[in-house]
Image (spheres, coloured by chain):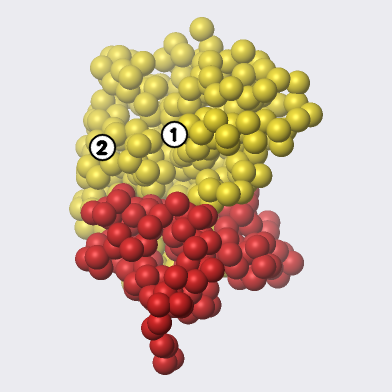
Amino acid sequence: MNLPYYPGCTLKSNAKNFEESALKIMETLGYPLQEMKNWVCCGTVFSMTSDDLMLQLGAVRNLLRAEEQNLNELIILCSMCYNTLKRAKQFITEDEENLNKVNDLMYKENIRYKGTVDIHHLLSILRDRVTFDAIKEKVKKPLASLKIGGYYGCFLVRPKKFAIDDFEDPSIIEDLLTSLGADSIEFPYRLECCGAYQTVTKKDVTAKRTYEIINSARRAGCEAIVTSCPLCAFNLDQGQKETAKEFVEFEQMPVYYFTELMSIALGCGWDKNWTKLHYVNPEPLLKEKSLI
Amino acid sequence: MAYKITRKNMKNDITEKVEEISGQNVFDCYQCGNCSSGCPVVDYMDIAPHQVIRLAQLGATEEILNCETIWICSACLQCSTRCPKGIDVAKVMEAFRAINLRKRIAPLNPDEIDEKDLKELPPIALVGAFRKLTG
């Protein structure tokens, strides 16, 4: 059976490599993803103001669309969409007054939002439904000797309630990388914010975050890092351009989506078009390890 | 800046609004500093997160509304998950941002983003910034 998924805006533009690789690997694993219809932007960041329900409408409308399409769950690839949808659902449905108000705001919709759609991140699906053992069996090209750090960032593990693993000491990405045959390395800054949207107004902040996070990974022995968030990927990969300007001794490091490496390991290969979406050339390291 | 602490200004309209928007009681804070020590962007802030909470307790809301800190905070929730008193510090920051933004006091004017950035930045960065930094 196909798993319904919500892509989000950036997976259709700057992070096409994330979407394409995720579709490939899920097909190969026997859990093909099917894009839901009529989705809109989730709002990117969850609004933490308790008195302004308008700011929840982007997220809630997607969940309403899913209910309209009789979907009982949605698989999310982007960490920020996952977090925003999950928190919006909880905030709106835990309080009947909020639920009623939001439905009144959406009075032109054909049905009323009830809150019946479960929201899962792709990583949890890989762990809980596909299972890492099954993935291990399907590995055709082990990522042997590739030293990789899993970068979680904020929204896979915070707030605690929606953490897909332990919120201070998760291992889900490391366990996945291990099942792919990689040498997975825990590095100290793996849960630290990349500076997120500050990249629009305060590039010095994100440049320093990138400097600290990449250097932390390098000191721990990583040759590359993986992420599941297109904003982290932008700041940590494209952001290295700005970082190199501010810190002369800075050395580049390739940043991958976890699904790109899964695609190689599961025998779906590397798509040349993905290379263009990276700033730090992702190919030399993969060639050095004879993976592509 | 000299600031006179009185009963009247310790609990003012703004502190009440912050409590309403955030649902947090800033008086729970005993100033352990855990939020500031874990904050990944504290070195870019003019007032550290625990100091923001202290100023809020004292009713010095003007200082908070005019500081850089509330805009540097990117709501990564490190402070909120670690607070031993269970204060959602990020929600308090969001409340101060919201009070400014509702008066159209905002650090980002979309018209001023340069052409090159608009082409390069992913939607996830732009929408995030618009939602958090524009009124």
Callout 2, which amino acid? Answer: Asp
Question: Picture quarter containing residue A247?
Answer: bottom left
Image coordinates of residue A132 in percent, x first then y, are: 29, 21
Q: Nearer the viewer, mark 1 or mark 2?
A: 2
In this view of the protein, which residue sits in the foreground, A171 or B11? B11
Q: Tell me residue A62's x, y (percent).
A: 63, 30
User: What hue does chain A carry in this figure?
Assistant: yellow
Asked if residue B105 shows in the view, the reply is: yes
Q: Residue furthest right?
A: A108
Residue indicated by mark 1: A260
Left or right placement of residue A40 versus residue B17 in this view: right
Q: Is residue B125 left or right of residue A137?
A: right
Q: Is residue A204 visible?
A: no
Q: Earlier in the sequence, mark 1 or mark 2?
A: 2
The colour of chain B is: red
Q: How many numbered circles does the render carry?
A: 2
Residue B111 occupies quadrant: bottom right
Quick check: marks 1 and 2 in contact, CB under 8 Å? Answer: no
Q: Which residue is mark 2?
A: A166
Q: Which chain is disc 1 placed on?
A: A
Q: Residues within 10 Å of mark 2 (few under 14, many from 20)?
A: some
Label 1: which secondary element: helix
Residue under the point 30% across and 14% down: A134
Residue appearing at x 32%, y 23% in the figure = A127
Q: Chain of mark 2?
A: A
